[in-house]
Image: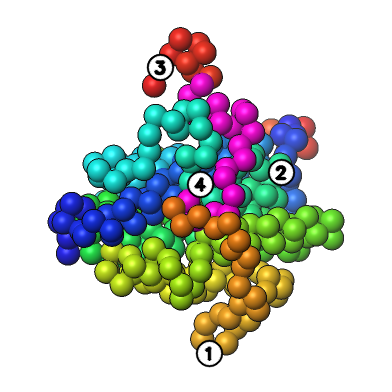
Amino acid sequence: MSTGRQQMNKQLYEVFARHKREDPLGHIGTVRATSDAFARVYARNTYDEENWTELVLVPRSAIIPVLELELLLDPTS
Amino acid sequence: MYERTEDLPAGLRQDLADWLLTLADSKRILGLRYAEWSTGAPELEADVTISAMAQYEMGHARLLSGVLAKMEEDPRTDARSTDTVTWRNMASLDRPAPGWIEVVTLNGLIDALLTVNLEAAMNGNVAPVALRLRKAVSEEEYHTLHAQAWFERMWSAPPEIVERFSEAIRTAWTDCLVWFGPVGADNSLDRLGAAGVLDGDAEALRQRFMSLTMPMMQGFDVGAIAEGGGWVLVAEPDLEGWDPSSRRSSPPDFDDASFAMLTGAHARAMGVED
């Protein structure tokens, strides 16, 4: 579905965070951005509701699959 | 360290009150200008970001107003609800930003000037101001990153966008230089700096502003030349008519809708008081 917004050269980033130092880093969501700089700002402002001690981003493209999710739907549909 | 604003000499108290109001009014209206684009940014993530930035700006305005409200020198009167002249925001904020290009410019220049001032007071010697500003300054870090990212994107946009962006920058840049006022002449920033209320005088703050913003210009000529580790202006701004209290050369020129929003007139028309 088109949002009517700019979609130029956007990359998907996975967002991870932890509350306390001893907590595991957990996946909290994603952002789409045209650069790492935008991704940092967007993640900070999208996920700032909670008092994180750490918030990090990983480009989806940097993730190395070990067991890949089987697609339940035809990706072209 | 001054534990209370009352401990400052009378003249400095008035300088501080005037400074607080210029920042509080500018931040409040900057928040309004950001909020006007909370569903109109070029991408959904930018909507979320500009909305958050609007809330931060209004929060900072409230914080500064809170300090000001406790001072006898608070310049605000009841006339503010009907008299535009009593507002002391930066001139670039008088009218709504006509496009996202101008919003980015406000973020990159006006917001930067305000942040330079907050940092100077955070490192100053008036405790009620300095202690309250730590969180605000840390929140501004992401406003700067947002501006840097958008400036970079704007400079690589099609020529017509770059041209409009350049024009917006020239206007806001001039407004910023005017705000800093006369350097080496009668300027309350110099007095506040000399007393340690701010950790720098007018020229020091202007240098910090240029150090923060010039790297974002990517060579665009705004009339500042790098020299000796700082920046030298090709020409000082035209300060004819400059008012030291409002730090601007002409009274605010709000559109009716903006002024009604700022003064709560819309709410009063509905029978809702402040």
Residue B204 pos. (x, y %): 43, 74
Residue B21 pos. (x, y %): 40, 47
Per the image, the residue denoted by label 1 is B228
Q: Earlier in the sequence, mark 4 or mark 1?
A: 4
**Element under disc 3:** loop
Q: Which of marks 4 and 3 is nearer the N terminus?
A: 4
Question: Between marks 2 and 3, how big is the CA–CA gap?
Answer: 32 Å
Q: Which of marks 2 and 3 is in front?
A: 3
In this rendering, does residue B168 appear at all? yes
Residue extending furthest toward the front: B241
Q: Residue at horizontal 27%, vertical 55%?
A: B13
**B157 to the left or right of B254:** right
Per the image, the residue denoted by label 4 is B89
Residue B119 pos. (x, y %): 37, 62
Question: Between marks 4 and 3, how big is the CA–CA gap?
Answer: 24 Å
Q: Which amino acid does label 4 sit on?
A: Asn
Image vertical order of residue B193 relative to residue B63, above or below: below
Task: Specify the color scheme.
Answer: rainbow
